[in-house]
Image (cartoon, rainbow, N blue to C red):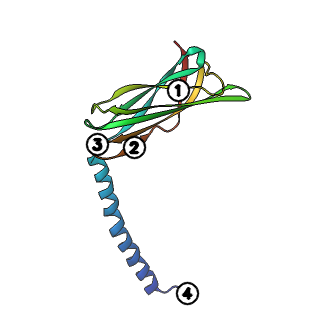
């Protein structure tokens, strides 16, 4: 089948129509998300070992709109020997948002073995609710697990 100029013209018009509807809709969704306030979560570069490595305390910096509440989750994974890893998850629920950056500490228990001083990988997840719902993730972050 050979394409003719009229087919290209119809295709261009169809593409233009799709973009004309899609771009404003995307902008409206973005504007709506911004109008509810920004939720952010970041993991501090250092975590603290407690109870001989049975737990580590992860500090997260949380920002969310005043009047809302949040729940925050932290996951830590660490290689403790050439053939073994350990992992843990912790969370805090129903915390009040201050409208400014606030530091929260999450206790993360280790399993199946204790955390050790050194490098670990951590992720954080934030859920904000109240007048509306939003969520944010940290992505994977390298943290230094230290004895205190």
Give percent across and percent down for residue 104: 39, 26
Direction front: furthest residue: 94
Q: Point out the tag, 3 or 1, that comes first from the N-terminus.
A: 3
* Apparent side of residue 66 relative to residue 6 in the rendered image (left or right): left
Label drawn at residue 133: none
Q: Nearer the viewer, residue 112 or 80?
A: 112
Foreground residue among 108 and 123: 108
Q: What is the crowding at mark 4: few (fewer than 14 residues within 10 Å), some, or many (at least 20)?
A: few
| Labels 1, 4: front one | 1
Q: Nearer the viewer, residue 126 or 27?
A: 126
Secondary structure category for the residue under label 2: strand
Which quarter of the picture shows residue 49? top right
Q: CA distance from mark 2 to mark 3?
A: 11 Å
Q: In this picture, is 131 found above or below 43?
A: below
Tell me the CA gap for discs 4 and 3: 53 Å
The numbered disc on residue 108 is 1
Mark 2 vs mark 4: in front? 2
The residues tagged by marks 1 and 4 sit, at their Cα atoms, a distance apart of: 64 Å
Q: Mark number for residue 2? A: 4
| For marks 2 and 3 on the same chain, the one whose residue lies earlier in the sequence | 3
Q: Which residue is mark 3?
A: 37
Q: Quadrant of residue 114?
A: top right
8 versus 134 height, above or below: below
Going from the N terminus, do you reach mark 2 or mark 4 first? 4
Front position among marks 1 and 2: 1
Kindly indicate whether the residue at mark 2 contacts the one at mark 1 (C-beta within 8 angstroms).
Answer: no
Residue lying farthest to the top in this orientation: 148
Residue at point 38%, 71% (across, down): 18
Q: Residue at x 67, y 29 (%)?
A: 85
State left or right for residue 113 relative to residue 15: right
């Amino acid at each position: 089948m050979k394409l003719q100029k009229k087919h290209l013209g119809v295709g261009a018009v169809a593409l233009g129509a799709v973009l004309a509807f899609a771009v404003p809709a995307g902008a409206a969704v973005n504007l709506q998300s911004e109008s509810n306030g920004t939720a952010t979560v970041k993991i501090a570069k250092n975590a603290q070992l407690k109870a001989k490595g049975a737990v580590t305390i992860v500090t997260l910096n949380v920002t969310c709109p005043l009047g809302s509440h949040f729940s925050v989750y932290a996951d830590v994974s660490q290689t403790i020997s050439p053939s073994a890893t350990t992992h843990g998850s912790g969370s805090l629920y129903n915390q009040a948002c201050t409208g400014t950056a606030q530091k929260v500490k999450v206790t993360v228990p280790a399993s199946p073995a204790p955390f050790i001083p050194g490098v670990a990988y951590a992720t954080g997840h934030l859920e904000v609710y109240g007048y509306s719902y939003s969520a944010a993730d940290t992505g994977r972050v390298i943290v230094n697990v230290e004895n205190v």
